[in-house]
Image (cartoon, rainbow, N blue to C red):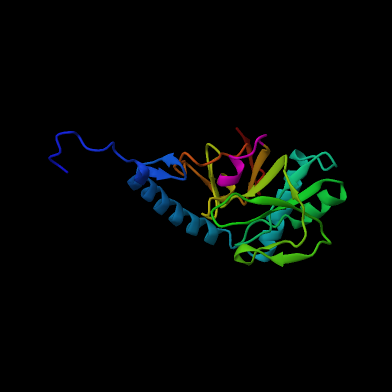
Amino acid sequence: MDDDATGGAPACFAHLLVDGHLVDPEAARDVARFRRAERARLVAARALSAEDRERATDRLIDGLDLIVPLDARITAAVYWPIRGEPDLRGWMGKAHEAGAEILLPVVIERDAPLEFHTWSPACRMVRGAWNIPVPAAGELRTPDLVIVPLVGVDTTLHRLGNGGGYYDRTLVRFEKKPRIVGIGFSGCVLPTIYPMPWDVPMDEILLSDGTHLTR
């Protein structure tokens, strides 16, 4: 009660918790609105012609070849392209042939961390969450390299993704932190995405214009 002379019960701050972090709800809403607008703008901007997309993807793959050794020593989590993301399946096949173990992310449960399952060019694929193809019988593995698609990225290498938060939820939970490389088309760099406590920065980013930034 307002006039309780005892001071009442201790204050509850549960309404300020977002994914276990203490965050001002109004600030979180403002950031979410900003990110939705920037996400829509950047996704629209990467609607490239077939020729421009092919050239940009080739440049990205050439750049990956320079910074990632293609041999049996790496276990690399990549991704299946959606919503105009760079298509790295050619690089995935080449890395597999070189002996690298290639993984794809799998959504096991909504709002839970991802799992990474083994993939090969000949493996059978099935429709997973949001109809994204995943390996039908892939084995669970832990990557030492995670290649993450960027919708946008800021100057501190914090990533703007598709909005589900799955990578942030996953990357923070690794016992041994993998190398995290963000991949995107040129023109996706923002001054800031207004990082929140749960946002996990990339170790490096590689863009189709040859930009390669590291923390």
Residue, far front: 6
Going 54% across and 59% down the picture, which residue do you hit?
Answer: 43
Q: Does the magenta stretch include residue 165?
A: no
Going 37% across and 50% down the picture, which residue do you hit?
Answer: 29
The answer to whether residue 88 is left or right of residue 169 is right
Quarter of the figure that contains the N terminus: top left
**Residue 49 in which image quadrant:** bottom right
Residue 85: x and y in percent read 63, 57
**Residue 86 in which image quadrant:** bottom right
Residue 182: x and y in percent read 63, 45
Quarter of the figure that contains the C terminus: top right
Residue 58: x and y in percent read 74, 53
What segment carries the magenta color?
169-177
The answer to whether residue 128 is left or right of residue 67 is left
Residue 60: x and y in percent read 70, 49
Q: Does the magenta stretch include residue 173?
A: yes
Q: How many marks?
A: 0
The answer to whether residue 17 is left or right of residue 202 is left
Residue 83, compared with residue 28, is above or below; it is below
Main SS, magenta residues:
loop
Q: Nearer the viewer, residue 132 or 139?
A: 139
